[in-house]
Amino acid sequence: MQSTARILPKRQPSRSATFSPAWRSSGSHVSLGAMSPLPCTFHLFRSRGSALALSLCLVSGCAPLASRPPSIPPSNRVTHTNPAYDAQVRLLQEAHRAFVQERYPAAALFFNRFIDDAKDSPRLAEARWWLGRAYERLGDYRSAMTQYRLLAVKSVTQQADGALYEGYALRRLDDLRRPRPDGHHGDAMQLALSVTVDQLPSITGLVPWLQELAQAGVTVLAIAPAQTPKSGIQAFNVETVRSVAAETHRLGLFLWVVLDLHDGSGLDVRPEWMAATRQAARPDDASRSSVDVAHPGYQAYLEETVRRLARAGCDGVVLAARSTAGFAEEFSDESRRLFAASFGLNGTLEEIFGSMASTDITEQGQSATYWRWVGWKARSYTQWTVRLHKALRERNPAATLSIEVRQSSLAMPLQGLQQFGEDVAELSLNTGGSLVVRHEGIEGEAALEKLSRQLGGPDRVWIGLSVKTSTRPLAMEEFNQSIADRAIFGRWNRLIHAESGQTIP
């Protein structure tokens, strides 16, 4: 019997650019080094008990391979005559290297890119398996399960070790479906920085700036439309996303887009989509400043916008929390018509909101029709977010949809529903994405714990924090200090909103 296998000593994961160190992963016990059907070495036979060691070796070697987790294959330095194939192999090697170095966002991007670019590769099953493992390490268990389902459902027997990866995927699906006593899937705290497009550096300064962010621990860059007065001109375009995405992905960062659906900043909003109120019911009233989120035309427009963002390379969308109260008071002629048709009503303003003279009606004094309207509009918004999530994942199955809600809505759900349209329970259960809780300076640790249990783990809960920036460009010392000042939120994923009147740089 001949064998070249060897046992590597256990040590901590290395962040070097090689595959030589041993590596361990909770739940998988993945090992690196020379691959062999027998996890033993001839050095064992030189010591006492060599017969026992040989017996154990043979037993483990005869065990079904599907019962053992796969190992990252060694680097293949053989050069082929096909340049496209060589490029694919190098991309897969870079993905494995990023995984070993615990750069999981970069690993996920590289594995995704390999899957998109090498659809006929015999190593697709391998790439999907390790993409799922990368998502697990990032805490995105739903995306991990998506990859495992693709391996378990699709025919992969023609791919390298396809049948075995199918078995691995089935086992991981069973493991992830099994509830844990503490409801906790492991720490995968991420840090996102949100800036407006006018705060982004110039094209020459973008790469160094992104490198500094990555070194500071940022895993996600989120860009929002410029805070400019409404002028009817679209201030946020897909080309901006495409150019920034190319650089963020190259450095292993995710790119998200922040959209304020209630305000419509940076979007090409039509006049008929604007919302009226009881006090400003005329279509041409200049005081109308919000968009009716229940208008079907506006909803269809945003769904197509999200598809374009995904095609441009966007990895996720954040739906910003409504900045002003008054959700229940707003309507358009179309949404009011749809509501009336749903309940067999006339849909007049007096029927829904009561007499115009009654402008200070308490919550207890509102009619049953009014609360039907509030519930109908909030449900329409929730169903819309579900469709936005679906549209986002049509192009990128790993893309994430995050919805920002106010911290006060966790403590006072009725007020959050009426004033801001935030039915937290429905949003958390139906969208399948993450919730960003905008911190408002009130105690809420217990509410966050409850929310994390509802969502299946703290990895789907983000804390939204605002940081005032005073330097130009944004100094990493200032950024790091702001993070340190908020160390109390270190257990949760954090989305930092950079608020500054200056551009960066």
Image (cartoon, rainbow, N blue to C red):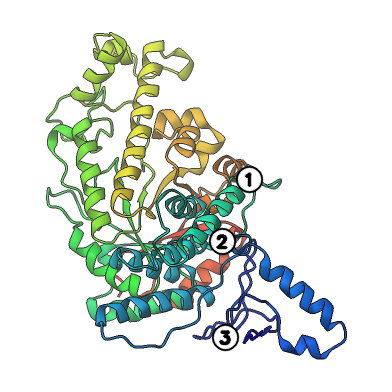
Q: Distance between the residues labelled 2 and 1?
A: 19 Å
Label located before the other in sequence (1 or 3): 3
Residues 423 and 27: in front is: 27
Q: Is residue 429 above or below residue 394?
A: above
Q: Is mark 3 on a helix, strand or loop?
A: loop
The answer to whether the residues at label 1 and label 3 have Cβ atoms under 8 Å apart is no
**Which residue sits furthest right?**
48
Which mark identifies residue 20? 3
* Quarter where residue 123 is shown: bottom left
Label located before the other in sequence (2 or 1): 1
Residue 457 visible? no
Q: How far apart are marks 3 and 2 (CA)?
A: 25 Å
Q: Which residue is drawn at 34% across and 71% down?
A: 248
Label 2: how many Cα within 10 Å (few below 14, some 14–19, many 20+): some
Q: Name the residue under label 2.
A: 188
Q: Distance between the residues labelled 1 and 3?
A: 33 Å
The mark lying in front, picked from 2 and 1, is 1
Q: Name the residue under label 1.
A: 178
